[in-house]
Image: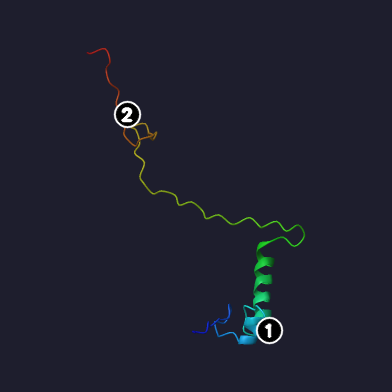
Amino acid sequence: MNELRRFCVRCTCEIPWKRWRQGSHFCSLDCKKKADKEMDDWRKANYCRRCGIRFPRLRKARKVSTTPVLALSDGAPTAQGIPAVEENVSGE
C-alpha cells in the first residue's frame, strides 16, 4: 500500500511520521512558532486590540473620466454633450 506523505503548511517540507500521527500541520516547533507569529502580526494589523472590531478597509479612489464636455455658445455645458438647438414649434 502507498504511504501518504504530508507536508508542512509553512515551509512545504515533509512532516515526520511522529508529528503527523500527533495531528500537527507543521514539520517542527520552530515552523509552528513562526506561523503563530505571522498570524499574530496579521491579526494586530487588521483588528482592534481592545474591542476586536476589524479595521475599515481603505477604498481606492475613483478615476475621473477625461471625456471632453461640449459647451453652448453662452458657455454652459449640456448634459449629453450635444449643443441645444432652439426649434420653431409654431411651424414658421
Q: Tell me: residue 69, above or below residue 25.
A: above
Upstream in sequence: badge 1 or badge 2: 1
Nearer-the-camera pick, 59 or 64:
59
Expressed as whole percent of the image width and height from the top left, the position of residue 18 reads: 65, 86
| In-image side of 66 versus 52 (left or right) | left
Q: Which residue is drawn at 32% across and 29% down?
A: 84
- For label 1, the residue is 29
Q: What residue type is labelled 2?
A: Ala
Expressed as whole percent of the image width and height from the top left, the position of residue 23 reads: 65, 78
Q: Tell me: residue 55, above or below residue 87.
A: below
Q: Within 10 Å of the Cα at label 2, are there few (<14), some (14-19), or many (20+) other Cα atoms?
A: few
Q: Which residue is drawn at 69% across and 71% down?
A: 40
Q: Tell me: residue 39, above or below residue 33.
A: above
Name the secondary structure under disc 2: loop
Q: Within 10 Å of the Cα at label 1, are there few (<14), some (14-19), or many (20+) other Cα atoms?
A: few
- For label 2, the residue is 84
Q: Which of marks 1 and 2 is in front?
A: 1
